[in-house]
């Protein structure tokens, strides 16, 4: 064990706000005691304070929304920037409704971009659980569009 | 949606990132225009996203899928109802196709017409046009060279050394220097192959190669009525592998007579190209003060602030006003003082290896004569996907000596931790006697690095990398 | 140790803290002079300490025991072999005794002579001198007023409203406005008591009180040979309780003829005081464009950067050169453009209650036309012991409109978290129609705050404090 | 393990504000205990990164040097800025030496400032343990001058 090793350990102890730390090489012993007053690190505090980058009412992919909310739900996100529509035209009926069963490859909605209607297909089999965007709302890249409850075998 | 003929706009989408996106947002704000930022998922917390009134994510980190993703960017303008797009530099700024699509979508592209971009983007066509317009052009082939045999004929006319360049290129790729006829064959084939790989176009042309030239460019600003203003020259000879590192204005080399002749040539070049908006005509100047057109950049340049500083003229604001069809105040006929820009890159200062990461500590310089253009902040991430420019420090003084003293002071007090930066490189260049003398050429950096290397072999103990804090 | 007659120096001790210490270090660096910072134990991690070549701790946090501690500061110069002291503003900058001790210790005091400081520090003596020199002085008592009876006599000559001021004072303390004879007795006694408490000297004098004056000052720069240069005026009428908050140059109110007359008066004033080095002659200007000498500040002012910006002239560098006995380049005869300074204080923006603390996040503005003078950095502590100035933002444009637009943009993008700042106050002032019109007086802030109050009573939902982020 | 190693480790222990630290080379055993009163992690981290404010060879009071290093030792710090001398003149003998007993009010050294010799008196009774400044060296306000081992009743 060199001084460099010790220096690194001291840095880690401080970084992790430990009250004490024990370590034994051959007996493989570790003992860590952390300060109960340990606050979030500086960087975390700062991230929390950054203002929301958009005021435009666009549907934003929140950094904290995971792509998969649970093992049984898949969130479909927008692969492009455009306007979200649930049907092919104002008069047409929606491609799917909450509760609709969906098959792989089935059209879920369209994103209009540069006057083109881009059909968004389901990558999974399951049931529509919820819409996350209103009809006609603009969406950016990565914006969550809808949630699909996965079929049992998919979620396994 | 604005109709294609309507030029007025109140909201501008900034199709770029980093310091130039911040710069454009500032100019928009000075004019009371609303702004829309675009960003990749790697730039979610970037300063330009925080600063803009709105922001739209346009793709994953890779530039081609986000900042060069034309459909997503046009769509972002449409959903945010931005009526104009400022492309900044790099990315889509010199993409004529993008400018065309903007027009087709009824969006004002802030820059010259797609035709002008297309024309000047084709180096061979641009040169032919310049020859017609009476602008001195580097002696070389008229148009592109199809075969090696044709190339050898042209080469014997021009004489050696010469350089083979990609017609669709830039940035050093597809370039080969040939010093004697027996090297020609190999060089020609390599250049063609590289050109094809880099630009999808294997066309090349041949030019005389100058050994110790200066790289001098003239800033132009064209109005819709055809008026072309010039804002003097910038000396960009401090380059490494065709990448500019430090720029200054005025050039310590250029006389008033030469400046006037080059400005007249830049005006002739711009008029020949029906140039509207801000642009830059780049010249090589040989030691005998002869100048030759190289190319025209149809966008704002990284180094535009040095001209802004000595002319006290906001070029990006002028870009917006020209695009709006509003009158601009003419730039003053003469500059005052001297300005230097150092590009602070996230790179190892001596190997120039990129050094992306998180800025853990940041102290920016300030005080009299110092301007900072940056998107950096303490805690900001420099992603590995884009160019490594972190900040531009611009020092202005009443003369070159004062500008250098202020730059040395500013870089000395600048602290960037968490990433390596090129600050130590700039500090050494600014103290270099050749640089101080003002008598340098585009081979300065190569010689400077060689001198440094030599010195470190003789004095190994003194040559230690002083690190980003030095 | 330098002998008292030797003026040349290579190392300067900066007897101050905060942004002005940083400012002086920058000027020293531009001239190649070494620097010594002093600091109190509260300022151990302050930027001026980090920036200077050396630093000496001179005492505990309290100003009187550290930054005003003459023996420790002189001793710090001696042990660090600093041959000159720059006092900045505040603290010991106008302490004639300190300047004398410097001279006795063989240290160059960067400022006028102790005699000049002493003379101009005594407001009554200064005014008597100005009257002799033919400089218009606010009508008032000749010398100090000893008794209430004498005061009443003088008052009836001057007429009401009038103001009673402490002879040794400044900054609003020991001042009383009297609008009618029956208020005189009370006001006189209170002013004497306050003067004694604040300045250890109960002497007071009486002056005419102007209802809506402007506070305009002329920057002077005296050379050792007696030459006096002027750098136009600064309008400092945006004050709250005699504390300047925002300054601009040129004044939107002053005509060329008035500027010339005031500059001539400032030159006469400076010559009468044998003035050497940078100084400021302060005037009240009444709505009829008559001007009256108030006082002369024998030091660099907080707001000096607005003059520097429009004259492109480094006043602190000039201070050092004059002290070195070196020639200075004369300032240009005419300024160019318009500059505004906002003092960003660590205070509640509407109650002006000090808000010391740690800066947890800092984003400083930049880009064209923006200069920042600050000692702040992310992680820096604003201690409660000193004045609350955190940063000076100086915006320069080709005219007043452009300077205001740039200042609005800069303050809009400036982020300071962890402490409250006066940014929201400045943003509202910059948008205020009266301010925009340029037709304001020293009562602007009072009326502005009253209008704001009134508006908040009528529209309670809109008047919420927008917080430091607004 | 050299003295340099020990010095470095001691410096690290102080820098990291540890209450105790154990180390064993062959069995590779480490035991670290950190002060629960350690101030905000950000400030400490930053202080560690700030370049030393002084290059002038001045004796600096380190921010982490406690006024009392242990219950039994008192560090005498300089109340003024000046030059430290152990005797009243070059020819005179030092006021005290390491091991000298000192009484309250006894002169320990002088600090010369502006040609004046300022006598520094002991506030405590005890024995001189160590000098922390060389004779003739400049000192700033708060600079640690010498250590006094306190007499038993003082330290109680």
Image: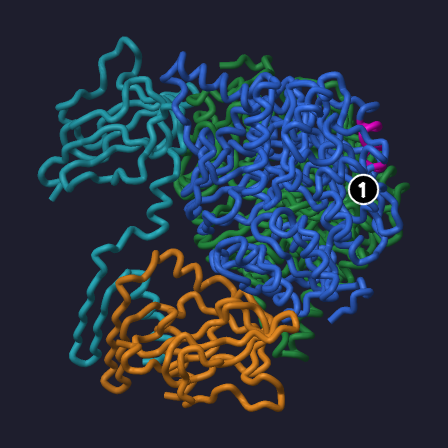
Chain colours: A cyan, B green, C blue, D orange
Q: Is residue B339 above or below residue C467?
A: below
Residue farthest to the left? A152
Magenta stretch encompasses residue C267 = yes
Compared across the picture, whether A5 is left or right of C180 comes to: left
Measured from the top left, where is residue C269 in percent x and y? 81, 37
Residue farthest to the right? B257
Q: Is residue B286 above or below residue C365?
A: below
Please name the residue shown 28% across and 71% down the image. Answer: D19
Residue B97 in view in this figure: no
Measured from the top left, where is residue D135 in percent x and y? 56, 83
Please name the residue shown 64% across and 47% down the image. Answer: C89
Measured from the top left, where is residue C378 in percent x and y? 46, 49
Numbered-mark total = 1
Measured from the top left, where is residue C263 in percent x and y? 82, 32
Query: In front here: D21 or A12?
Result: D21
Location of mark 1 (residue): B137
Query: In front here: C317 or A133?
Result: C317
Compared across the picture, whether C65 is left or right of B144 comes to: left
Which segment is the magenta one?
A: C259-268
Q: Secondary structure at mark 1?
A: loop
Query: In front here: C104 or C406?
Result: C104
Residue B80 in view in this figure: yes
Query: In front here: C222 or A63?
Result: C222
Please name the residue shown 58% across and 64% down the image. Answer: C55
Graded by Cα atoms within 10 Å as few (under 14), some (14 to 19) or many (20 or more), the crowding at tag 1 reads some
Q: What secondary structure do most residues of the magenta stretch adopt?
A: helix
Q: Chain of mark 1?
A: B
Q: Is residue B278 above or below residue B327?
A: below
């Amino acid at each position: 064990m060199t001084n460099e090793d010790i220096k690194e350990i001291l840095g880690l102890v401080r970084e992790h706000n430990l009250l004490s730390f024990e370590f034994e090489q051959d007996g493989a012993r570790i003992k860590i005691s952390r300060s109960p007053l340990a606050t979030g690190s500086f960087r975390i505090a700062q991230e929390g304070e950054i203002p929301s980058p958009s005021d435009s009412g666009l549907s934003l992919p929140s950094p904290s929304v995971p792509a998969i909310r649970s093992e049984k739900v898949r969130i479909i996100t927008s692969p492009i920037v455009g306007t979200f529509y649930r049907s092919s035209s104002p008069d047409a009926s929606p491609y799917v409704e909450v509760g609709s069963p969906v098959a792989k490859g089935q059209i879920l909605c369209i994103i209009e971009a540069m006057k083109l209607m881009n059909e968004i297909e389901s990558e999974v089999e399951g049931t529509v659980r919820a819409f996350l965007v209103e009809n006609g709302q603009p969406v950016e890249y990565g914006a969550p569009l809808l949630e699909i409850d996965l079929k049992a075998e998919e979620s396994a | 949606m604005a109709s294609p003929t309507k030029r007025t706009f109140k909201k501008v989408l900034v199709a770029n990132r980093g310091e130039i996106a911040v710069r454009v947002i500032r100019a928009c704000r000075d004019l009371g225009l609303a702004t829309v930022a675009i960003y990749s998922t790697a730039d979610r917390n970037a300063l330009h996203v925080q600063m803009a009134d709105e922001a739209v994510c346009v793709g994953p980190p890779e530039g081609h899928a986000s900042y060069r993703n034309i459909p997503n960017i046009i769509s972002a303008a449409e959903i945010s109802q931005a009526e104009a797009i400022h492309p900044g530099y790099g990315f889509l700024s010199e993409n004529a196709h993008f400018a065309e699509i903007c027009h087709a979508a009824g969006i004002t592209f802030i820059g010259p017409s797609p035709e002008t971009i297309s024309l000047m983007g084709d180096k061979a066509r641009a040169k032919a046009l310049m020859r017609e317009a009476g602008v001195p052009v580097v002696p070389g082939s008229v148009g592109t060279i199809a075969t090696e045999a044709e190339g050898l004929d042209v080469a014997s006319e021009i004489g050696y050394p010469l350089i083979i360049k990609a017609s669709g290129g830039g940035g050093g790729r597809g370039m080969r220097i040939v010093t004697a006829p027996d090297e020609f064959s190999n060089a020609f084939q390599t250049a063609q192959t590289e050109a094809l790989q880099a630009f999808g176009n294997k066309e090349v042309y041949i030019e005389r190669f100058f050994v110790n030239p200066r790289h001098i460019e003239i800033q132009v600003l064209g109005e819709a009525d055809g008026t072309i203003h010039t804002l003097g020259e910038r000396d960009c000879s401090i380059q490494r592998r065709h990448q500019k590192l430090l720029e200054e204005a005025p050039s310590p080399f250029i006389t008033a007579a030469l400046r006037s002749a080059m400005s007249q040539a830049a005006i002739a070049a711009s008029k020949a190209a029906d140039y509207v908006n801000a642009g830059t005509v780049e010249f090589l100047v040989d030691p005998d003060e002869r100048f030759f057109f190289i190319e025209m950049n149809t966008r704002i340049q990284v180094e535009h602030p040095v001209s802004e500083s000595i002319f006290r003229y906001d070029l990006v604001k002028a870009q917006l006003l020209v695009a709006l069809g509003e009158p601009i105040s003419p730039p003053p006929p003469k500059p005052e003082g001297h300005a230097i820009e150092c590009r602070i890159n996230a790179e190892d200062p001596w190997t120039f290896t990129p050094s992306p990461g998180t800025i853990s500590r940041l102290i920016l310089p300030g005080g009299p004569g110092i301007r900072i253009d940056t998107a950096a902040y303490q805690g900001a991430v420099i992603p590995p996907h884009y160019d490594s420019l972190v900040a531009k420090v611009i020092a202005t003084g009443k003369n070159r000596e004062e500008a250098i003293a202020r730059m040395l002071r500013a870089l000395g007090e600048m602290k960037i931790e968490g990433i390596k930066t090129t600050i130590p490189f700039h500090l050494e260049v600014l103290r270099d006697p050749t640089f101080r003398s003002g008598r340098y050429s585009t081979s300065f950096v190569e010689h400077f690095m060689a001198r440094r290397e030599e010195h470190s072999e003789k004095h190994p103990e003194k040559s230690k990398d002083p690190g980003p804090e030095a």
